[in-house]
Image (cartoon, rainbow, N blue to C red):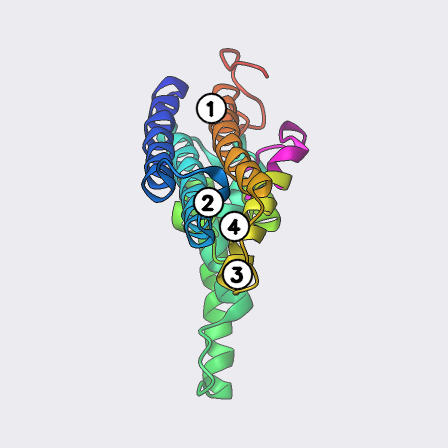
Amino acid sequence: MNATELRALLEEDLSWRIGELRHLRNSLLGDLDRDDWPASALRAILVMQYAHLEGFARYAFTLYVDAINSRSLPADVLQTGLFASACIPEFDAVRLGPGNDQESEHGRLTRRAQDQVAFVEKVRSLHKLPLQLDAKHAVAMDMNFGRDVLRRTLFRLAIPEDKVRKSYYESVEFVRRTRNDISHGSRKEKIPLGEFESNVKQCEQFMNDLAALITAAVQGEWYMITPSATAETN
């Protein structure tokens, strides 16, 4: 997958998400005066907005993984973070185990030894074959998609932090916090219209910025230790 193909897929996905959000807004708010916008409608729009933001982020990062996998590159030319991401299941097996409280001491010791061997076997295989990332693990969002999950995902995918503006973290955290407040029942009152509009704007801006970032990462081959001569610099 090249950068042009990736950008087209991102724009197609972003277009329908933003279109759906605007359709929802028009359906719930219609021709009402701003002062008459129902609090329940504003909350519904903001919760749906967060769902699309997280969904688009997952999709964008998954496409980035697909673009890397499509190159079938050996591990030794890729950034170390990607090598580590390919070992996430093995890391978890060694660190967490099966989570079975009924496991006997004898069984636990044997299982730990087996997990350690499986980890070494995985590392050996990564040196022999083209590295293939599993997006299910590399792009896992096992908690609310906010500042920390975004930073972890960027680190796992070897996207340099100096390529990411501070506004990325501020926008995603603002949208996440508002969604959580609504879900936890602490925003039963009407949300100030200025805050509502700011939330909508920052959500759309984050998704557009993320699409540009992922495209630049593929164009510039940020995933490689030494990008090729044809890579575009940013």
**Mark pair 4, 2: CA separation:** 31 Å
The residue at which mark 4 appears reads as 145
Locate residue 197 relative to residue 160 in the image: left or right: left
Q: Are marks 1 and 3 in contact (CB under 8 Å)?
A: no
Q: Are marks 1 and 2 in contact (CB under 8 Å)?
A: no
- Give the percent coordinates (x, y) of residue 220: 53, 20
Q: Disc 4 residue type?
A: Phe
Q: Mark 2: which secondary structure?
A: helix
Dot 1: few (<14), some (14–19), or many (≥20) neighbours within 10 Å? many
Stretch of the chain drawn in magenta = 155-169
Which part of the image, by quadrant, shows the C terminus?
top right
Dot 2: few (<14), some (14–19), or many (≥20) neighbours within 10 Å? few
Task: Provide the major secondary structure of the magenta segment.
Answer: helix
**Mark pair 3, 2: CA separation:** 16 Å
Labels 4 and 1: the sequence-earlier one: 4
Dot 4: few (<14), some (14–19), or many (≥20) neighbours within 10 Å? many
Which mark is in front, 4 or 2? 2
Labels 1 and 2: the sequence-earlier one: 2
Residue pictured at 57% horizontal, 33% vertical: 159
Query: Is 233 included in the stretch rendered in magenta?
Result: no
Q: Mark 3: which secondary structure?
A: loop
Query: Is 157 included in the stretch rendered in magenta?
Result: yes
Q: Mark 4: which secondary structure?
A: loop
Compared to 49, does 165 lie above or below?
A: above
**Mark pair 1, 3: CA separation:** 39 Å
The residue at which mark 1 appears reads as 215
Q: Disc 2 residue type?
A: Asp
Which mark is in front, 1 or 2? 2
**Mark pair 4, 1: CA separation:** 21 Å
- Give the percent coordinates (x, y) of residue 120: 50, 56
Please say whether residue 161 is visible from this viewpoint: no
